[in-house]
Image (spheres, rainbow, N blue to C red):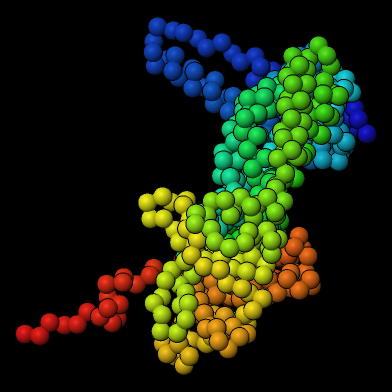
């Protein structure tokens, strides 16, 4: 039920008269009298103020009575929540105020005045602007989580993630994160919240065009990143490490590879979003030409990614052989089709031989041992070739090895199938590396014997269940322990006290 404010009701006839009297006392206060006597003026003014305060207290009581029966009032399209807002209106406008018997929450929301003036195309453009901005905010948050939650933690654990492994897993994602931080700041700057359809986003994408070109490197490395992660996740320590990183950063419940694929998915969405934005942009809009140019630029980025697809395995193997100096024997491509594992190993080529450190490359059918140049960082020298087809891989327990007559730790033995040829002993840096090499040798056999296609490798190992990570494991893995100084290892756990 609605009545005009000011009309008489059966129950509250005297109420309106009281309100009118109070209104007059507030809207038309007596003029303050300025007399020569300062005390008289202050006394008179205090009297008027007291009367006004008393009137306001009466008003509050009357307002409570009115609002109890009529919880809301309406003046045109505006909902009024109290009588005090009525008195802010002109005397002519007060007669149009309606008393409502429902609460404002029960009323259907009225559209903002600006929405009534927008065309369907303008509303559509505003919605697309919102979608672009909100999706970019979410994407930058995910990139920040990858950077702070995974990348920085992996940087600290250098014993688990050397530079080469870190580069393989994350590629140039740090540069991509910086690019999108700038893009988001630019979008926020050009966003017009009151009139989103007038926002100009086309120029923002054009300014970051050079940054988008970095996606070619990331997308081409993505397969290598997944392969490296699939090798690591089968090792319990790495599996726990990734899960601890995710929980500490309070990231969404996704596996590590689910975060790695986000940039690949995102770069493919930009042309679609910009095309929808162009459809909702009239030709006379200031942003029309910039959006057109941004679509062309983003399509060029995708074309460049497609044209720079990763080289096939034969080309990679050939390029690797070309950087190794002093090559001996037949070419790699004659026997091998894929590089499976690489890393530093300490090798005993035969019993009672001198241990030497090599950079080892495991291919299907063979392993190549190289020496690094101490002066030229990227220079490699050929030292030895091991025929894996003629070797049996054995996991050596820590302790003393009778064949080599030495104590071993984190070791793998390559025992020759021919009695006249000596076995070889490989030492890894730690237990995690040893497990990686054991899985790599197992995979090498599958590829060499035809049980596993080259392009399917790294993907057949089941991931560990890390849903039951304990707090002790989390605290241990989150802060890797520092290595003990090599100086004290010579003397035991504690320095020997000096005898007096």
- Residue 292's quadrant in the figure? top right
Residue sitting farthest toward the bottom? 402
Taking the image as shown, residue 129 lies to the left or right of residue 110, namely: left
Residue at x 87%, y 37% (from the top left corner): 107
Residue 157 rendering spot, x and y as whole percentages: 48, 62
The answer to which of 76 and 436 lies nearer the viewer is 436
The residue positioned 54% from the left and 61% from the top of the image is 328
Q: Quadrant of residue 420?
A: bottom right
Name the quadrant containing residue 196: top right
Percent x, y of residue 284: 81, 11
User: At 78% across and 14% down in the image, what residue appears?
Assistant: 285
Question: Percent x, y for residue 377?
Answer: 43, 51
> In the rendered image of this protein, does residue 341 appear above or below residue 496?
above
Residue 146, position as x, y percentages in the image: 60, 52
The one nearer the camera, 153 or 345, is 345
- Quadrant for the N terminus in the image: top right
- Closer-to-camera residue (383/241): 383
Q: How many marks?
A: 0
Residue at 6% over, 85% down: 500
**Residue 179 horizontal side relative to residue 345, left or right:** right
């Amino acid at each position: 039920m609605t009545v005009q404010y000011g009309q008489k009701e059966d129950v509250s006839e005297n109420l309106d008269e009281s309100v009118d009297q109070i209104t007059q006392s507030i809207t038309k206060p007596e003029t303050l009298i300025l007399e020569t006597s300062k005390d008289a003026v202050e006394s008179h003014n205090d009297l008027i103020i007291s009367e006004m305060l008393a009137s306001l207290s009466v008003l509050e009581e009357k307002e409570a009575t009115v609002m109890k029966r009529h919880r809301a009032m309406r003046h045109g399209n505006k909902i009024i929540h109290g009588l005090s807002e009525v008195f802010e209106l002109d005397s002519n406008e007060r007669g149009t105020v309606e008393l409502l018997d429902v609460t404002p929450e029960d009323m259907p929301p009225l559209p903002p005045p600006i929405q009534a003036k927008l065309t369907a195309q303008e509303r559509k453009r505003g919605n697309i602007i919102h979608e672009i901005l909100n999706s970019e905010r979410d994407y930058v948050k995910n990139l920040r989580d990858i950077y702070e939650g995974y990348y920085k933690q992996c940087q600290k654990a250098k014993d688990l993630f050397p530079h080469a492994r870190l580069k393989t897993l994350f590629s140039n994602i740090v540069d991509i994160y910086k690019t999108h931080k700038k893009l988001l700041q630019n979008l926020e700057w050009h966003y017009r919240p009151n009139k989103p359809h007038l926002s100009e986003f086309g120029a923002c994408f054009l300014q970051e065009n050079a940054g988008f070109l970095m996606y070619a490197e990331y997308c081409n490395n993505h397969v290598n990143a997944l392969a490296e992660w699939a090798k690591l996740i089968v090792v319990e320590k790495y599996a726990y490490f990734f899960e601890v990183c995710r929980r500490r950063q309070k990231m969404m419940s996704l596996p590590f590879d689910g975060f790695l694929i986000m940039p690949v998915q995102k770069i493919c969405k930009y042309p679609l979003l910009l095309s929808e934005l162009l459809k909702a942009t009239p030709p006379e809009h200031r942003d029309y030409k910039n959006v057109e140019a941004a679509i062309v630029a983003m399509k060029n980025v995708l074309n460049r990614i497609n044209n720079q697809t990763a080289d096939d395995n034969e080309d990679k193997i050939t390029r690797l052989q070309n950087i190794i100096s002093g090559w001996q024997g037949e070419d790699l491509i004659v026997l091998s089709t894929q590089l499976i594992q690489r890393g530093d190993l300490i090798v005993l080529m035969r019993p009672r031989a001198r241990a030497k450190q090599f950079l080892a490359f495991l291919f299907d059918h063979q392993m190549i041992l190289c020496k690094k140049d101490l002066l030229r960082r990227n220079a490699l020298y050929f030292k030895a070739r091991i025929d894996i087809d003629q070797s049996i891989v054995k996991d050596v327990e820590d302790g003393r090895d009778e064949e080599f007559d030495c104590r071993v730790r984190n070791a793998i033995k390559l025992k020759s199938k021919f009695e006249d040829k000596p076995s070889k002993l490989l030492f890894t840096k730690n237990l995690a590396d040893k497990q990686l090499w054991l899985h790599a040798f197992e995979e090498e056999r599958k590829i060499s014997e035809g049980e596993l296609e080259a392009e399917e490798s790294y993907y057949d190992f089941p991931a560990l269940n890390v849903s039951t990570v304990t707090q002790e494991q989390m605290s241990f893995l989150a802060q890797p322990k520092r290595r003990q100084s090599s100086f004290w290892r010579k003397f035991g756990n504690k320095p020997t006290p000096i005898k007096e």
